[in-house]
Image (cartoon, rainbow, N blue to C red):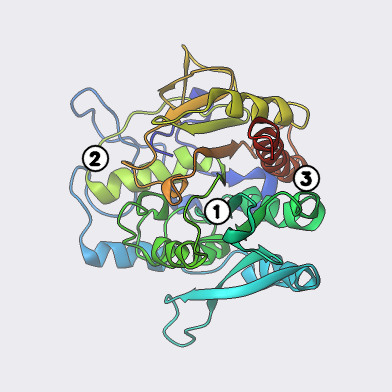
Amino acid sequence: LVTRVLHPTRAYSRHATHRARGVQLAPRAMNTTKTPPHDGNIEPWYPIGEPGVPWTDEQKLQWRASVEAPKRSYATEVLAKLEPLKAKYDVFKYGALPYDDTDPDRYPLFAVRTKGFDPSNGKPCVLVTGGVHGYETSGVQGAIRFLERKCETFTDDYNILVAPCVSPWGYERVQRWNANAVDPNRSFSDRHTDESKLLGAVVDAQGVKRWMIHVDLHETTDSDETEFRPAKAARDGEYIAPDVIPDGFYTVGNADDPKPDFQREIIEAVSAVTHIAPDTDGKIIGEPVTQRGVINYPVKSLGLCASITDAPYVTTTEVYPDSPSCTDDECNEAQVACVVAALTHVNRVEKL
């Protein structure tokens, strides 16, 4: 999210991997060489640009060229799994990302809606989003698994809309940013990326005056430190210091309306699937822990996807897929457990 931290034994690894995905990020991204300290901080070396100098447009294109080759298939791993869901839900295209000049439909965006979705039918409306950061695999696969295995359980009580992969270009390239070297999950306040603009349009088009729940599915990975934070520092001409990646699951609540009981029930449900992240000196990724496995962010001012609906019940999940004690399947199940716990809690508290 905002701050990414790193375990000292993993610092500045030349071979950042997505262990749970079998995807190895290019070793070109990092080197054990560090730039000299600057104002007390240290920046890991990055192969594009000059330390302390923001990237030019040409350097952003250089970055895109360095990551352009796909590492996996959006069509095979995501779109193909949506086809069977058409028998149970409304599966519809809501746009396409304009990142392939030769094929404007190369990255189609799909949403899945419960049949009979109607804000006037008295049922609360729920939004589930995955893959806002394309490299966070279980956010995408967990959203799909929720649709496959659990969503029908809640259709009597809720209108549900799921956008399982908001950033397919990033999904294929195992990247946090979009093709323009912009983080989609900082763009929802003014919708200045194609990802946030198109997702915002489809959410608005549902005609919902007041969404009840939004669960935004994410991961925190080792590559946040070995690749993505150094890339951000290089792009912005900033200097960063390493810290500690939390080994385990946590959630991010809305600081303006944190709903601690809601977050607690999600943590309890996930703890039956995978382990919860411990704090380091009372913090997780540099933010104060408000209760076990929970931190809060001002989601609207940061332009996070979690702010797109103004729902009273909001959480951003953070699965840790690089843990040696957590499998791919457990990561996906943890995301499902989050959504189920969120809907179950609100059903009980709001007496639906």
Label 3 residue SS = helix
Please state the horizontal and vertical placement of residue 283, each as a whole percent of the image: 46, 18
Q: Amino acid at mark 3?
A: Asp
Regarding residue 220, the answer to whether it shows in the image is: no
Q: How many marks?
A: 3
Q: Secondary structure at mark 2?
A: loop
Q: Is residue 171 above or below residue 262?
A: below
Which residue is labeled 2 in the image?
238
**Residue 329 circle label:** 3
Using the image as rendered, state which of residue 202 and residue 271 is in the foreground: 202
x and y percent of residue 131 in the render? 56, 55
Crowding around mark 2 (Cα neighbors within 10 Å: few <14, some 14 to 19, many 20+) is: some
Name the residue located 73 percent from the left edge and 35 percent from the top edge.
326
Depth check, mark 1 against mark 2: the one in front is: 1
Question: In the rendered structure, which disc, 3 or 1, sits on the residue that comes first in sequence?
Answer: 1
Residue that label 1 marks: 135
Instruction: Name the image quarter holding the C terminus.
Output: top right
* Residue 341 image position (x, y, % from top left): 70, 36
In the rendered view of the protein, which quadrant contains the N terminus?
A: top left
**Amino acid type at image mark 1:** Tyr
Q: Residue furthest top?
A: 281
On the rendered structure, is 210 left or right of 249?
left
In x, y percent, where is residue 299? 39, 39
Pointer 2 or 3: first along the chain: 2
In front: mark 2 or mark 3? 3
In whole angstroms, how far apart are the C-alphas of marks 2 and 3? 37 Å
Q: Earlier in the sequence, mark 1 or mark 2?
A: 1
Q: Is residue 267 left or right of residue 104?
A: right
